[in-house]
Image (tube, rainbow, N blue to C red):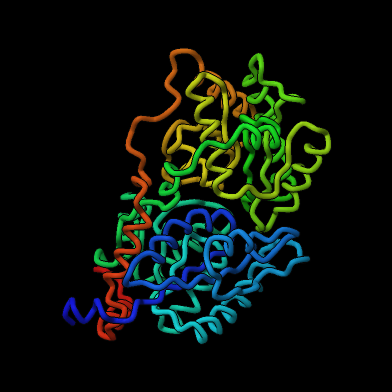
Amino acid sequence: MSGARRAKAKPASIMVVTGSRAEFGLLAPVMRAIDRHPQLALQVAAAGSHLLGSQPTLAEVRASFPVAATVPMQRARSTRSRRADALAVARGIAGFTKVMDRLEPDAVLVLGDRIEAFAAATAAALRGVVVAHVHGGDRAEGIADESMRHAISKLAHVHFAASAQSAARLARMGEHAWRIHCSGSPGIDDLARIPALPSARWVQLGCPRVVILLHPAGLSERQEQRTALACLRMAMHVQPAAVRPGDLVGSPPRPLWLAPNADAGRETIVYVQRVAAGAGVVTACEHLPRAEFVGLLKRMARDCAAGRPAALIGNSSAGLIEASALGVLVINVGPRQAGRQRAGRMAEVPSIEGRGWQDAVRRIERWTSPGSQSGSRRPHPYGDGHAGERIAEALAGLRLDDPASVARLIRKQNAD
């Protein structure tokens, strides 16, 4: 087909699936790039935890993009468990199939390893719709994250790897080189344009220089509780060290504890969070919009550079990607991010047994002592901030209006 004919063809419809607040923050730059591209048309399907809670984050998605469809999966009042997740996947596959019947997308784009992405990728692959996967090939040994991510990769027809290491891992999994694009992580894309959090909002949040962001890691209830308590203990040791004359505004600065993802084991972590907030030792927050979260990280990075201890504590991928890219110090706790590529200065606490947490706190204090350089000067392994543009351009180049090109895409074979 000639370039002139392709230019006049109907834009290829790309259905982007978002199922959680954190993953939406990563997907937003991709969605904007797709929406701006003249050869692509954006369709947004919101599912999963966006539809749960007293303040569903669906409103945040709708404030940025028109939402073409919603797919309820988890039950609002049910306890998060592995069994509940299995039932939610079944509802998701059925729901996404019906949505694709109505929207007829040319491709479905998903990110990461959550059950919403798995349900959408399964429905699309079985239905014969091209599946594009962002952040495939990563390692992250969470609850079922590793197997879910790799299962989505094997369902996917085109891959947008966040790093060269992840791209190489996809090739070793048997994916053909022509399917793999090393785009970088879209989590880096928005960082430069988001300003530091305004002082008035920072004061409202309790003047935090420490943020706890801990998600369930597939541990027993007792282990999840002990991990949450260990994070609190570390936060209380780092935050007082950050106090300087003139810092106090109304009340002493407190760590900010953000609520965990809506995964199995969430209730245990939330219980510890609420007890700590009730005792007045932390500020509890269900959700910070992406711009506020990044803005807060920028304030923390500024503190680190000025010699004031500040850290993100927990097991979120934000510690490895956004925080490290901005120069925020990180204490990574437990097994959830085991195997994932590191960047920046990160203190590891693989086990809460023993005195490892004290060593991590001392490392944070040492990295912000006079004469210490808090940030890493090495190139960030997750890209240069243009992942969204690369992904949109690659999608436009798939020739989704050409039946022969689509047939080649959806015919999966293991590479030799």
Viewer-side residue, 6 vs 102: 6
Q: Can see residue 4?
A: yes
Number of marks drawn: 0
Residue at 16 percent of width and 80 percent of height: 2
Residue 122 position, x and y percent, is 49, 75
Residue at 58 percent of width and 38 percent of height: 333
1 in relation to 56, above or below: below
Residue 231 position, x and y percent, is 66, 35
Residue 176 position, x and y percent, is 27, 67
- Can you say which quadrant of the picture contains the N terminus? bottom left
- Can you say which quadrant of the picture contains the C terminus? bottom left
14 in relation to 190, above or below: below
Give the farthest residue toward the left. 2
Viewer-side residue, 2 vs 415: 2
Residue 347 position, x and y percent, is 52, 31
Q: Can see residue 353?
A: no
Left/right placement of residue 55 relative to residue 291 reads right
